[in-house]
Image (cartoon, rainbow, N blue to C red):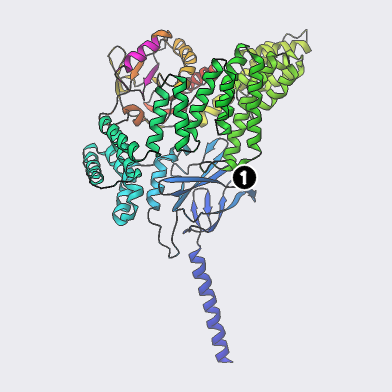
Amino acid sequence: MKKISIYSFLMLFTFFSCKQESEKKTQSLTMGQLTISNEHPQPGKNLDLVYASEDEIEAFYAYMVGENNYPLDIDFSESDGQQKASIKIPDSAVAFAVIIKADDTYDANDKKGYLVALYTENGEQISGSKSALSYFAITDGRYYDIKGDAKQTMEILKTDLNSNPGLKSTWEVPYLQLVYKNDKSEGEKLVRDYLDSLSKKTDPSELEYASMMHLYDMMGQQTKYDSINAVTVEKFPKGSAARNAMYMHFDEETDLDKKSTILTNYLDLAKADNTSDFMASTLAKKHYELNDMTNFEKYLSMVDDKINRASTLNSLAWPLAESGKNLDSAEKMSKQSVDLIISLQKNPELKSDYSTKNQYLKSLDSRFRMFADTYALILFKQDKVKEAITYQEKAQGPKADDPEANQRYIEYLLADNQYELVKNKSENFIKSGHGTAKIKEAFKTAYLKGNPSATDVEDKLAVLDEAAYNKQVADIKKTMLDEEAPAFTLKDMAGTDVSLASLKGKTVILDFWATWCGPCKASFPGMQEVVTKYKDNDKVVLLFVDTFERGATRKKMVEDFIKRNNYDFHVVYDSEIEGTRDFEVAGKYDITGIPTKVIIGPDGRVKFKSVGYSGSNEKLIKEMDIMIDILKS
């Protein structure tokens, strides 16, 4: 019995030891509000995720393969006050990032992100995973409010490259870029060594030629770039450089027959893609303008991607809808665009590798609403009011946050004498901050139709306006920052130096723009109103920073544009960084797209950053006013 007891004890001890060892191997990883079921996750394995929140969230994970990343949906569901989900990491992944969004705000885990390295079966971190994560943080991570460190990334890439030369094909060029930006002298030496090594190869690959072109472009060496580009086009007549050269030729060519030949040649050497779609779309539009409907239909059918084809049709239909001209043709094109998007919504598996299914469907929904808005306007101008209302209702987003679309909806309802609905809808639009002056007038009309002797309509509007203002203030305060505002000194159109240091104590609005930027120019009538309103306020300064614009005629283009449009803007020119394709102030403020507005408070720190243009000047002006008011206090 004693021997049996000892044996049983040993078996029991072994069981608990194994269990403890197993638990040790599967210890969870917690970062911020997110817990992952294994602190050493492996490719090809399943993981359980728990996010500490009762709120409904949107989420996906981006798995990394070298410097590229690919998104996949995460379907969280709420249970016991937590959001829970399971995912499977693809076999090819070296690392992944979990991206979580709630109430239109990304949870970036205090700017660090939810970045997760992957491991081998032996518990060793996969080679290159650190590089992938750090590089993601300074590139795509910026769009999710993750704050990467370029210098730290440079050192991580250097360490990984030294420890594993097999990573060179993936990380050597990104590493050289980072060194060059951080230390131009050292970077230039390393880049030249790299380029010399490639030039000595008897038969460089297309990818190696592309690397050479990329680095010469980075250093602003146009002649050498052109030389390598010519060699690449000759050696790889079906490669990306050859296709890009054909696109450039197409863009410069003015003869339609020659443009058509370039498109035909392009499709002979490559499958249809966004570039060929752009060419075909351009030709379709040109022939439509010439009233050559046979060729219009021919080239429209050559726009392979249905989203691109629908966008082509909508781009032609919208100006006709606005002008009220050729409405029968506009109706046909607009209906086609709507139907194309509907057909895609039924087949979401057609998405690309660079979006999740949910992202793809959300994008299609946005396009559908845009195109339905066009179609509704056309129907309205054809006196098909009820049909217009039907489609405008479909065009309304869940938040109804497009003031111009809201205004059209109210106009159609008013034309159909639906006064009670006009009153209710207008009230909601106004108090949510998504109304317009015309919507307010419609509210008055509808309110008085139901209450002819009422004298309180202005009071009711005042209450709605106050509610709208308070909501907008609260929403904008949620986006408030407190970050360092990098110093700069730039020349204005008069050649005078303008420094940020000289503006300390004032609210400074930097509007980053370029003459080629359509949304920038669309926002300028609204920005002119802001300039006029604060012209005599010495505590508010607006600077229009011309950036991402090159060429010997840059200043003339800018001056001619400002003069031609009678804008009273204080324009300053962002400085090109010598020997690079970069711009000084845009780089310092991490400007990746324009228009972008950076609002600096009287304390000299960045308080707001607004990217893009909503399409509504009324909304833009109100947002600028609120930001300025917040910073006064």
**Residue 590 seen:** no
Q: Residues within 10 Å of mark 1 (few under 14, many from 20)?
A: few
Q: Is residue 240 above or below residue 437?
A: below
Where residue 538 sits, quadrant-wise, is top left
**Residue 25 seen:** yes
Q: Which residues fall within the magenta stretch?
A: 540-562
Of residue 534 and residue 255, the one placed in the foreground of this image is 255
Give the left or right position of residue 534, taking residue 390 as reference: left
Give the residue pinned by disc 1: 54
Q: Quadrant of the N terminus?
A: bottom right
Q: Is residue 617 above or below residue 56?
A: above
Give the left or right position of residue 464, taking residue 227 as reference: right
- Name the residue: 57% across, 26% down: 298
- Name the residue: 33% across, 27% down: 585
Q: Position of residue 400 (x, y in %)?
A: 64, 26
Q: Position of residue 563 (x, y in %)?
A: 39, 8
Give the left or right position of residue 224, taking residue 605 as reference: left
Secondary element at tag 1: loop
Where residue 564 sits, quadrant-wise, is top left
Magenta span contains residue 552: yes
| Count of all numbered marks drawn on residues in the image | 1
Q: Is residue 312 above or below residue 195?
A: above
- Name the residue: 46% across, 17% down: 521
